[in-house]
Each structure stands twice: as structure tokens, then as C-alpha cells.
Image (tube, helix red, strand yellow):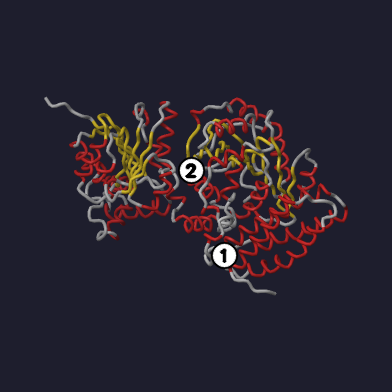
Amino acid sequence: MVNLNSDQLLQSCEDLYDELVRMLENMELTEDNHALVSVLQNKHQVLQTIETEANHYNRSHRVPQLISNIFYYEEQILLHIGQKDRNKLSFDFRYHYCNLVRLLCYEIAYLVEQDVDITRYPKLYPDLTAINHQQIIEQGNQTKYEVSVVLLAYNNLQYTSQCVDSIVQNMDDINYELIVVDNGSTDGTKTYFESLPNAKVIHLNSNIHLVKGFNIGMMAAEGKYIAAVCNDFIFTPNWISNLLICLKSDESIGFVSPGATYISNYQSINIPFHSIEDFQQRAKDYNISDPSKWEERVVLLPNVLCCPAALLDAIGYYDTRYYRGEFLDDDISFRIRRAGYKLIYCGDTVTHHYGSLTTATDHATNSLQEGRKIFIDRYNIDAWLDARKNQACQFIDYSRFGEVTTILGIDVRCGSSLIDLKNKIWSNHGVKTEVYTCTSESKYVTDLQSISKQVFSIEGLIQLPHELKQSIDLIYIEQGIDWYEGNIDDIFQSLIELLRPNGQLIFCCHNRLSVEMMKENFVQVARQSNFCQFSIPEIKWIANTHQLELTFQQDFLPLADEKRSQAISALTQFIAGINNNFAIHLESQMNSHYSLLQMTHVVKENI
């Protein structure tokens, strides 16, 4: 057996796939295809070598499962040739064998990426190549169908059949194809799929898991758009029509997804119902296309991954490194945004979600932490901390933002809370806003560029007026204002120089009596020379001297747990002793970690 180094291993995969592509493009498959037989026989040994070499890499992978399926379809193709079944031969070669080899190439590319010069393999590392937006449009105009609905299923036939029925019954008059992927089921799913009229059935003899299962289905798509779905959803009247209306409304939109029952990421729509039939009727009444319910997002859960098919092909579909599928949604959201497209949550459309049937087994493992680490290693960003909305957003008083047309977000991480502000102004007041951002952490610049008209890198708030030379209607500071070093008077002066008269300022500050701030002050005194120097009442007083009038305040605690509550209770009893009233007061102070403050720049005339 030949031993291959990483470059040779990757090159052998790429050469194999390129040869298959040339065969698809340049030759017609017939019943007596000697060239194809020769290729299959010659490449069998290469694939065995690839499998052996892949096991030398210390990363989780599914190379054995992929090659097992490739060998299965090698046998099927040889059988079709012997039986002179041209249709099955063509289908299995194109949609099974070739696409499985493509999946294998991506898998090997992930395994060896630390050992090779990835710039030599742009086809296997799509992030290296800038997206040609015009090409995406042109490819979309040459497709056979309007949309390809891709359904992935592994067992749970009862749910799968309900899902399929709901899709077929609610496609209206759209020109579509249904691609169903049986990911190695053992409960009759394959037979059921083969009974569906006109469905394109992708069957995997052994399970290749969620990521690659979806990818092989999407690779088979011949539609302008792809709508990829799991088998634990029920779809509703106008679901696909509404998504396509949104997707087609702006060429810069690259990914749309509807709301659902029992889902996270602020994409849940609560519609009480007592049966699926009742839910369908209620959903029909709800699912009226309404652009005021469209929300731009930094991260979007793919209740439906609805995107231009050419865009998904260009970015390489779902990233194979997410072995169990966790944080797959965050990753594809980041890659589509960074490719220059918007993500839109369609809050005008509801579907029903039973629960994670497709990934239920992995939830019992440490899959969330595994996926989180993979994402951090890939982007140097924590999707949970950096790409989610700040809890403070739920307390903001939006009634004063009717004339806001420009927003400046300061240290907003990846911008989820800032985009939520923009969305709420649109839904509450019908006003579209321009967004500017500035950050003191360079790792966020790339993602802020995807949602902002302009991004500024700063070291402190005092330099802001020198960077942004225009008046702003609303300034939102996500980082606590007492986190910044510098004179607090100078900070407020810099902010009001940017605010127009009657402009709005939103910021948080820490309660220095909270248990978290006590800990912070103990362990980081040397680093934070100005941290929490002032109490919240003092900060409000200083802001007022700079013509900033408090209009709203909300105290809150971002995260709470039983252990924290017990620690605070013990500490207050130790400090207050038998003074019960003092203990109650002290405990309330320690429990409130932040205060959200909204202020208006009130310009007072000189008398």
C-alpha cells in the first residue's frame, strides 16, 4: 500500500473528482460504458488508500462511511451496466457516486488543512475565493426548476410522511422538485421515498450524518433556489411562497428562514392549537406576506435553509468540520454574510417544529461544546457570546425612535443587538435606518462590515468625533460605559458632539455592588484603573451636566443560577448580620448586575 503525505492525499482526491466531472461533461453514459468500468476499477485502490491514510489524522471524520457508500454505488453502477439500465446508471453515477466523491474531497480537505498550502486548492477551500454575485444570478437564470425542496430523514417514518405531505400540499403552483435523502434508515423510509411520484430519491446505504446528508441532497438540486428542511417540521399554506417573495425582493438577500413553534434564536411564533389540522388553518390565516415582519439577522436558524442554489454551491454548502452538526447554523450564517449577502428572518411565516429528531442522539453527548469550540477555532469568535442579542434589548423603550434614520453602534460585538434595534425601528415606526459601527476589537470588523455602511476601529470613545464626522440620531453602546478608560466627562462630551439635538443615547453600566463587580474589582484592580469608578447615580448626574436627560432606566441581571443566588444570600447574611432590612436591601443591590439607561440630548437655550 502506498503511503501518501497530506498534499498527495488531497491531490489524489481532487484528481479523482476532476476526472469524474470531465466524464459527466464530455461523455454520454451508455449501457456498455467500458470507460466508466475502467475508471471505477482503477479508482477503487485509490479510495482504499485514501481511507487508510485518513485514519492517521487526529480529527473526527466520516471518511469510512463516505467510502462505504461510494463502494456500494460502485457495485450498483456495475450492476446497472450489466443489466443495461441506462437511467439508473446515469442517476447513480451523477447523484450518488460523483457527489459522494465530492463530499469525500471536502472531508479530506478539512483533515489536512493544517498540513498543506490551502491556496493551492481553491476548489476545496471555497472561503479563499470571492463570490461573483453576477455569476450567481446568471446561474440561477439557467435552472430547470424554481425551487428544489431538499428533505433529509433518518428513520422516524411517521414524522417524515407527515412532513412530506405538508410540503406537497402547500407548494401552490410553484415549479419545484422534491429531493428526499434517506440517510441510512432502517424503518422503511427508503421504500416510502421510492413510492413518492416524481421525487428524486437519494439513498445512503450507511448513515453519513446530518451535515453530509444535507449536502448530498443540495448537490443534486436543479432549482434556482434550495429550500432544505428536516423531517421534524410541518409546513403550512404559503410557506414557500412567502420565503421566495422575501428572497426575490432584494438581490443582496442570500438566506431566508421562517418562524416555527418550539424553536430558539427569537424565531419562535406561538400559535395555540389542538391538532395539526387546526394548526394548518391558523397558519393559513397567519401566513400573509408582510415585509414589516422581515428582520435582518446576524445568525439565522435554518428552520428552512432557503437560499440561491448557486450561492450554496459557491460557498461549499454546510461545512464538513461540524462533525455532529452543532453550530452549523451559525457557521453557514457567517459564511453567507461574509460573502456579501443579508440574512432575513421571515416573521410573517410560521411552521410547526416537533423537536430535534434529526440530531436527538447527539444532544445526549457533548456535541454543543464540541461545536462551540470548532466555531471559536474557525472564527476566533464565540457564537453564543458574540453573535447573540444582548438581553438588554428586551428592555429598550422604542417609542421615542420614530425619527431615527441613523444609528451608531459602539462595541456591539458582531452586531446582533444593533440589527435588532434597526429591525424594531422598522417594525414599530416604518423607518429604514443607516447603520454605522465602531469597535475597539479588530476581530469583529469583518462581520460588522456585513451589516454596516461604515466601520471604524477605535481605541476609546473620546476619539469618536474625529472619526465620524456627522450627526447621529441614535447611539447604542453595548459594552458597559464604565468599561472604558478615560475621564467620564470627556466620554459624555464626545458622545454629545455626535448626537443631533433630541438624539437618543442608550448604554449600560455596571452596578458596582453586584457580586460580579465585587469579584471583578478583586481580581482585576491592576488592569482596570477606571473600571466602575462611579456609581450609577453619579453617572446619571454627570450625563445630565452634558445635556443628556434620562428618559428610561431598567435594572437587570443577564444570567442567573441557583448557585449564584445561594452565594449572594450567604454573603448578605454575613455582612448584615441580624439586620434583616439591611440584608434585603443589600441582596437586591447585589442581584442587579446592570442598568440600561436611555437618554435624550436636550439642547437648552441660553436665557
x and y percent of residue 589 in the render? 30, 46
Quarter of the view holding residue 56: bottom right
Q: Which residue is mark 2?
A: 340
Q: Which residue is mark 1?
A: 112
Q: Which residue does the image show at 48% across and 47% down from the upper left?
A: 338
- Dot 1, how many residues are within 10 Å of its Cα: few (below 14), some (14-19), or many (20+)? some
x and y percent of residue 365 in the render? 58, 58
Q: Nearer the viewer, residue 183 or 162?
A: 183
Q: Secondary structure at mark 1?
A: helix
Q: Look at the picture and state if 434 lies above or below 326.
A: above
Q: Which residue does the image show at 73% across and 64% down from the upper left?
A: 43
- First in sequence, mark 1 or 2: give its number: 1
Q: Nearer the viewer, residue 158 or 78?
A: 78
Q: Look at the picture and state if 295 lies above or below 441.
A: above
x and y percent of residue 348 in the render? 54, 30
> In the rendering, which numbered label is found on residue 292?
none
Q: Look at the picture and state if 133 lies above or below 525.
A: above
Residue 592 in view, yes or no: no
Q: Nearer the viewer, residue 396 or 513?
A: 396
Residue 229 in view, yes or no: yes
Q: Which residue does the image show at 25% across and 46% down from the upper left?
A: 463
Q: Which residue does the image show at 75% across and 41% down from the upper left?
A: 199
x and y percent of residue 11 in the render? 62, 64
Total count of labels: 2
Cα–Cα gap, marks 1 and 2: 28 Å
Would you say 598 lies left or right of 177 here?
A: left
Quarter of the view holding residue 2: bottom right
Quarter of the view holding residue 311: top right
Would you say 505 lies left or right of 564 here?
A: left
